[in-house]
Amino acid sequence: MNQPTQARIFTLKIDGVDVAAREHETILELAQENNIFIPTLCHLEGLTEFGGCRLCVVEVQGSNRLFPACMTTVTEGMEVTTDSERLRVYRYMILGMLFSERNHVCSVCVSNGHCDLQFLAAKLGMTRVEMPYLHPSMVVDASHQHFIMDHNRCILCQRCVRVCGEIEGAFTKGVMGRGASSRIIHDLNGAWGDSKTCTSCGKCVNVCPTGALAEKGKSAGEMVKRRDWLPYLRSMQED
Amino acid sequence: MSAKAKLATVWLDGCSGCHMSLLDIDERILAVAEQADLVYSPLVDLKVFPEMVDVTLVEGAVSNEEDYAKIKKVRARTKILVALGDCAVTTNVPGMRNPFKVEDILNRAYLENAATNQHIPVAVIPPLRQTSLPVHQVVDVDVFVPGCPPSADTIFYVLTELLAGRTPDLLGKTRFGI
Ligand code: SF4
Ligand code: SF4
């Protein structure tokens, strides 16, 4: 057996364009390198891929399945389609479920104008939600001194859980329950403000794609998140 | 076309912001008036919704029995029904009461928080429905224009496209929230 000393290079097609990819690269990474847009929500550069939101599903020639681009590594000769009528239907469905499962009132939300969910809906030309809004009764945890967790706006992308464990090393945040009754919790489901493990670093607030996590005192549209620090911290860990 | 198109606007459970935004098209309203007659609207005096309307813009969610009866009638008498603004499209702020029971809301508003004259009105004010709904969950909607409110430019664009017989493409023009 020959032992390759460096990563092999594959050639494949994305949306009919020939591209070269490194072995072990994901379809999403490859698409982004080639300026091909694939919608994502749970993905965030610097965090471990989670494959939860399913917005990045793509079609791969020769298979009827849809593949999450963030979790699928490239193979030689692969032919990937990132946009089609079928994909659009599924993406609208996913966004629709995210909007209808909790209470998203963009006009009065702290993240209005700076929200990844809102932005994606607009970018994909979504002008309505087909499924009935569930309007569940949701709590807001304002027990932390600096931050607010508004479950009405949470899409369960788990960016906050990952950054808290992987980058800050605090492991304060977790998920409780299953399906639509899943909730982001702190420690053993206590109030955030009572957490002994939370370092109040605010990383979760800044990676959160929506208005679910915000700084206290922000009014509608005022919560702007900063994420430029994340890839640096990740690369420092890797060094 | 010899006869002008018939245009209507209706105001359900919304703050009137979408109508304000419509008025913000300013002098361009003259261009609209050349192509269409405003046959029914909170801005005109007619009390009965006419039999046959070409385009109706609907502001607001369907929250009470009057909204419900009105939108049913409007739909039956309109060719192209436009859900204008987030309340019509998503229920937006009117829908924020949906996690609560109507009884609790009325108690809160008219009894607990009322300093004087505490009573829940039973006449004149139309009864609230159990949940506030986006228009398309009550009747079929042809065109959706999200935004709180959609900008005057967006509204003008939608009107000109519809009056010219085209379907407006709203990609990049508006979004939930705005
Ligand atoms: S979190 Fe985003 S999508 Fe949800 S209400 Fe806020 S701005 Fe809208
Ligand atoms: S709080 Fe924010 S980051 Fe955490 S799961 Fe919910 S939406 Fe994602």
Image (cartoon, helix red, strand yellow):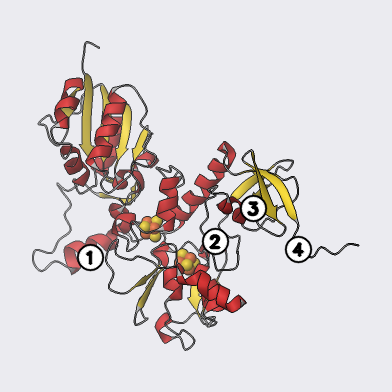
Above or below, A142 against B13 in this view is below
Quadrant observed for ligand 1 in the rendered image: bottom left
C-alpha gap between disc 1 and disc 2: 42 Å
C-alpha gap between disc 2 and disc 3: 13 Å
- Residue placed furthest toward the right: A1
User: Are discs 2 and 3 both within one chain?
Assistant: yes
Q: Is residue B49 left or right of residue A207?
A: left
C-alpha gap between disc 1 and disc 4: 69 Å
- Residue placed furthest toward the bottom: A196
Which residue does the numbered mark 1 point to in the structure image? Answer: B108
Mark 2: amino acid: His
Above or below, A239 against A210 in this view is below
Mark 4: amino acid: Gln
Which residue does the numbered mark 2 point to in the structure image? Answer: A43
- Front residue of A82/B44: it is A82
Q: First in sequence, mark 2 or 3: give its number.
A: 3
Q: First in sequence, mark 4 or 3: give its number.
A: 4
**Local SS, label 3:** helix
Which residue does the numbered mark 4 point to in the structure image? Answer: A6
Mark 1 surroundings: few (<14), some (14-19) or many (≥20) residues within 10 A: few
Front of the two marks 1 and 3: 3
C-alpha gap between disc 4 and disc 3: 20 Å
Which residue does the numbered mark 3 point to in the structure image? Answer: A27
Give the quadrant of residue A111. Answer: bottom left
* Label 3: chain letter: A
Give the quadrant of residue B12. Answer: top left
C-alpha gap between disc 1 and disc 3: 53 Å
